[in-house]
Amino acid sequence: MSTAPAAEKKAQANEFNPFESMAQLFDTAADHLGLDRGLREVLRLPDREMTVAIPCVMDDGRIEVFIGYRVQHNFSRGPCKGGIRYAPDVNLDEVRALAAWMTWKCAVVDVPFGGGKGGVICDPRQLSKNELERITRRYTAAILDILGPDRDVPAPDMNTNEQTMAWLMDTYSMHVRKTTTAVVTGKPIALGGSRGRTEATGRGVLFTTREACKKLGIRPQDARVVVQGSGNVGGIGAMLLHREGYRIISMSDQYGAIRNDKGLDVPAVLQHLKATGKLQGFAGADAIPGGKSQLEIPCDVLVPAATENQITSENAPRIQTKLIVEGANGPCTATASRMLDERGIMVVPDILANAGGVTVSYFEWVQDRMGYFWTEERVNSSLEQIMVKSFEDVSSVSVKYKVSMRIAAYILAIDRVATVYRMRGLFA
């Protein structure tokens, strides 16, 4: 019996495993840096992982047990930082990969955090607001010992929001017997949140798209842009790009996608989405299939801003764009990344392109600890300075090592974290 199908299936599983993808890119960057084996092991593996059971009394009186995770990848440069996502397909390898990406992301933009990530296996669409609150508070209580402004600072992620962070902050504060706003970011402004935080990730996508287009000689008014997604990253990113003169020709949500090659009226699209809960039915565009097929629309700029593993070895040959700006975490597998490089498609990697969110989270954490809050103008101006400088830093490393922007971002990030380890040494 041939083992080829089994081997092919295993290779595909490895490609779709986000932690394996991260590890491949890590090893490539570490090779360029000449990183020794011991330090590689230290930097590759998470510092701490926690799996918790979350019993919850449902609205109908029955008890259901959910599973939650919190992974702290690295503490060396400061407290761990990273979102909490609620989704039915959350798994530990995904959370490990996201935590590692947060370490590299924080290092790329040079904010003093390490990487963390959390998740709860549940389907928020099937849960009431009261059930979500009970799950959040019980999850917070279960991981309380590893949280704190100087330990681990969560934030919103997929299917969580500022209300989720308010519940988390309140639960933590009740346990430590004092209001501790700096334990989370992405909070409501009334609870110590930062102006500009909601738009920060999409704004970072705008800044990195603008800088990459300059490198490629693409003028905003000539750029056709496809955005996969319509949430905080995709929707806000599309709105900001639209305001800057880019022509958004397609957007998508979990139900499908819409397309208008003359350009979408993005404010009207988002108003329709808010009113109806889905993009379908928007009068100013044609409905088209969503998912990975949308990514194959010919365009100048492609912004995958949905979830992981959207561009793979299967569809990478059919991608028709000059530039990819990764609004989501891990939308391209490591294998697909190599294929895109070979085709000469420039990719602004996730650990740079979507770092606007963690940058303004850092600003929020600083403001909470100071007890002094900035204007939105100051937040946005400071974000632009950091994102533009970080883009240039990665671009310079790309030229120096003659590698893609993705590998350059990893080289820059890993070198910054490794330098701290060498200076601090290992406690024994």
Image: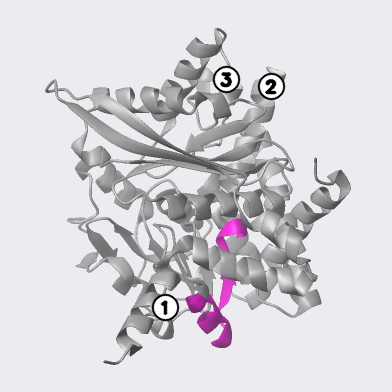
Q: Nearer the viewer, residue 175 or 131?
A: 175
Calculate the distance from the C-alpha at mark 2 to the C-alpha at mark 1.
47 Å
Q: Decide: marks 3, 1 in contact (CB < 8 A)?
A: no
Residue 332 vertical placement versus 73 (above, below): below
Dot 2 falls on a residue whose secondary structure is helix
Q: Decide: marks 2, 1 in contact (CB < 8 A)?
A: no
Q: Which residues are magenta?
A: 335-352
What type is the residue that disc 3 sits on? Thr
Residue with the most extreme left position: 60
Residue underneath mark 2: 369
Q: Is residue 375 left or right of residue 56?
A: right
Dot 1 falls on a residue whose secondary structure is helix
Q: Main secondary structure of the magenta part?
A: helix
Disc with the residue nearer the chain's start (2 vs 3): 3
Dot 3 crowding, Cα within 10 Å, few <14, some 14–19, many 20+:
many
Q: Nearer the viewer, residue 225 or 192?
A: 192
What type is the residue that disc 2 sits on? Arg
Q: Decide: marks 2, 3 in contact (CB < 8 A)?
A: no
Q: Where does the image place residue 161, in percent across and percent down from the top left?
A: 41, 34
Q: Residue at x 60, y 36 (%)?
A: 361
